[in-house]
Image (spheres, grey):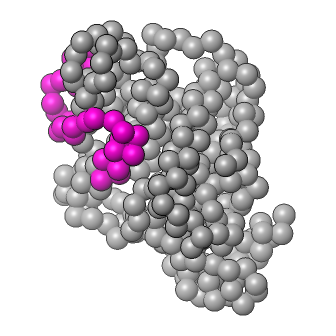
């Protein structure tokens, strides 16, 4: 497979005390992996779950940062009924022993619990605009850690079973999922709204017909309707993706260099995290400003023109 280019230079020396506390677990049978609260973001939403909890947890374990005299059983924080399915799938694939406990379990507050580093906050939501960090910075080091885990995840996805041919060299038109009751206003989620309850993009059937007719095979793909590793395979195999801004676009992390990503931005908050992911993976990112048009958009002819330009670039 193709590895992510190290675009921000050599790794600096690691600070073993900053990424986690609780490194001296010794003979403990169970090691809690605690999600660190922070603003913005909740571990119950895919972007922050993926980049603020599960990937940095895997990275911490795989780098040998958790010292134990025998293979431990990890205690994972429940991230809600949707994300817990993904959490289970990823930790099983890495061959790790684990249990999932409610977020209020007092073991997550113990002094020897591992505080999983929040890569989502330290990299993507910092004050640097969308430029890649300077060489030797702590943020650059975190990007290198992310690239290492990314490679391990893609290797596992491609080795497990092959569904990549279904999406090979196709343009994926991303469809957001229906909002589960857990995320509805008044539900149990820490932050309400999910999928089409927050933002939506329609017109994929029309766009697929147009792209197919133009010789650009397309597929309507709903990430939330697929298992995690199927999503990794789909994004890794595709020619490019077209999406409204949303948590599922974090899956551009799995895309191959030179693939394209066209994102309609219908949100007023900065989009620097997508530029980081695009630069890190060597992708061609095109952000279309649709902030004035509201959170529920429909693909139009002008968007197809942007897609065609992205394919031809």
Q: Residue at 28% of width from left, 10% of height from top?
A: 26
308 relative position to 238: left or right: right
309 relative position to 118: left or right: right
Q: Residue at 77% of width from left, 74% of height from top?
A: 308
Specify the quadrant that holds the C terminus.
bottom right
Q: Residue at 15% of width from left, 30% of height from top?
A: 105
Q: Nearer the viewer, residue 299 or 24?
A: 24
Magenta-highlighted residues: 85-113
Locate residue 268, reporting x and y percent.
Answer: 55, 53
Toward the right, the furthest residue is: 313
Compared with residue 183, is residue 77 higher up or lower down, i.e. above or below? above
Q: Nearer the viewer, residue 265 or 95?
A: 95
Compared with residue 114, is residue 173 higher up or lower down, i.e. above or below? below
86 relative position to 168: left or right: left
Is residue 93 one of those drawn in magenta?
A: yes
Compared with residue 2, is residue 289 higher up or lower down, i.e. above or below? below
Locate residue 115, reporting x and y percent.
Answer: 35, 23
Locate residue 61, reporting x and y percent.
Answer: 42, 26
Is residue 95 one of those drawn in magenta?
A: yes
Q: Is residue 242 visible?
A: no
Answer with the quarter of the image where residue 75 lies: top left
Q: Is residue 203 visible?
A: yes
Q: Residue at 69% of width from left, 66% of height from top?
A: 239
Compared with residue 37, is residue 243 higher up or lower down, i.e. above or below? below
191 relative position to 199: left or right: left
């Amino acid at each position: 497979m193709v590895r992510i280019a190290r675009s921000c230079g050599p790794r600096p020396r690691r600070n073993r005390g900053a990424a986690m506390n609780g490194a001296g677990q010794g003979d403990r049978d169970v090691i809690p992996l605690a999600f660190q609260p922070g603003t913005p973001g909740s571990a119950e939403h895919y972007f922050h779950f993926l980049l603020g909890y599960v990937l940095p947890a895997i990275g911490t374990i795989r780098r040998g940062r958790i010292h134990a005299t025998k293979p431990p059983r990890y205690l994972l924080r429940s991230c809600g009924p949707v994300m817990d399915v993904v959490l289970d799938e990823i930790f099983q694939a890495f061959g790790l022993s684990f249990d999932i406990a409610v977020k209020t379990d007092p073991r997550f507050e113990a002094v020897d619990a591992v505080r999983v580093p929040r890569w989502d906050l330290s990299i993507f939501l910092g004050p640097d605009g969308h430029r890649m960090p300077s060489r030797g910075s702590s943020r650059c080091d975190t990007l290198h850690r992310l690239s290492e885990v990314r490679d391990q995840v893609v290797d596992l996805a491609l080795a497990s079973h092959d569904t990549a041919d279904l999406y090979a060299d196709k343009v994926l038109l991303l469809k957001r999922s229906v909002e589960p009751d857990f995320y509805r206003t008044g539900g149990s989620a820490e932050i309400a709204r999910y999928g089409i309850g927050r933002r939506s993009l329609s017109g994929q059937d029309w766009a697929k017909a147009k792209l197919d007719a133009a010789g650009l095979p397309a597929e309507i793909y709903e990430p939330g309707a697929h298992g995690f590793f199927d999503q990794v395979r789909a994004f890794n195999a595709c020619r490019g993706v077209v999406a409204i801004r949303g948590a599922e676009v974090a899956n551009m992390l799995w895309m191959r260099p030179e693939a394209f990503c066209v994102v309609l931005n219908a949100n007023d908050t900065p989009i620097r995290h997508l530029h980081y992911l695009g630069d890190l993976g060597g992708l061609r990112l095109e952000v279309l400003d649709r902030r004035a048009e509201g959170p529920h958009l429909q693909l139009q002819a002008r968007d197809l023109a942007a897609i065609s330009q992205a394919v031809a670039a």
